[in-house]
Image (cartoon, helix red, strand yellow):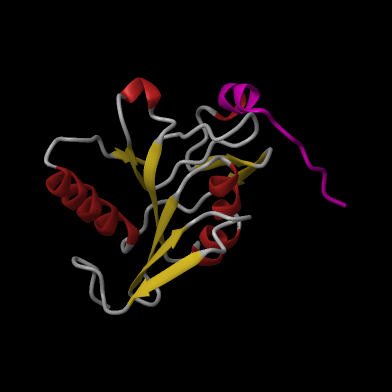
Amino acid sequence: MATRYRFRVEAYERVFREVPHAELLGGEVYRMSPLGPKRFPMVLHLDHRLKEALGGKALVAVQSPLRLSEDSEPEPDLMVPKGPLERYGERLPLVEVADTSLAFDREVKPPLYAKAGVLEVWIVNLKEGVLEAYREPKGGFTGACASIAGKPPGLPRG
C-alpha cells in the first residue's frame, strides 16, 4: 500500500521549492507534465494575446503559484489578476492549457478553484481544438460550460 503525505502550503513551499512542475492540490503534491511542443507555443500565444487585448490595464501571470487555501497552491498556465497586484486574490479568469492533462484539468482543479471563489476557468483543450469556458461555480463549475468549436487562434497544427 502506498503512503500518502499531506502538506500545508508553507511546508510544501519549503520542501518542494526546487522540484520542477509540482503543484499542491488539496494537500497532495502532484508532479505535473512539463510544457511540451503543443502546450508551450499555446501558452506563449495566449500570454501575448491577453496582454494585447488588455492594453496594459491588467497583468497576465504565466505559470505562477496561486495560493487558493492553506492546502492548495496550483500554478495555472495563465491568470489575469484583477485590481492592484497586492490584492491579486480577486482574479479572473484562470486558464489551463491541456493536452495530456485534460482529464486532470477538468476534474481535479475546477472544484478547488470554485471553492476558492474563482468565477471563471478556461481550458484550452488541445486534443479537440476547443476552448472550454466554465462559469458560475456551484459545487465545482457545474453551472455553465461553453465549448467554442474550431481551433483557437495560434493552435499548433498536427
Residue 12, given in percent of the width and then of the height, sits at 61, 28
Tell me the quadrant of the picture where the C terminus can be found. bottom left
- Residue located farthest toward the right when viewing the structure as drawn: 1
Quarter of the image holding residue 54?
top left
Image position of 113 with respect to 107: above or below:
above
Q: Residue at x 19, y 67 (%)?
A: 153
Image position of 72 with respect to 113: above or below:
above
Q: Residue at x 30, y 24 (%)?
A: 84
Quarter of the image holding residue 131?
bottom left
Residue 31 in view in this figure: no
Query: Does residue 9 appear left or right of residue 124 in this picture?
Result: right
Image position of 67 with respect to 119: above or below:
above
Residue 37, given in percent of the width and then of the height, sits at 31, 61
Query: Does residue 141 appear left or right of residue 83 in this picture?
Result: right
Residue 123, given in percent of the width and then of the height, sits at 41, 61
Q: Residue at x 74, y 35 (%)?
A: 6
Residue 35, given in percent of the width and then of the height, sits at 37, 53
Range of residues picked out in magenta: 1-14
Residue 46 in view in this figure: yes
Q: Residue at x 61, y 21 (%)?
A: 10
Between 113 and 13, the one lying in front of the other is: 113
The question of residue 157 being in magenta is answered with no
Could you tell me how many numbered marks the image carries? 0
Between 44 and 145, the one lying in front of the other is: 145
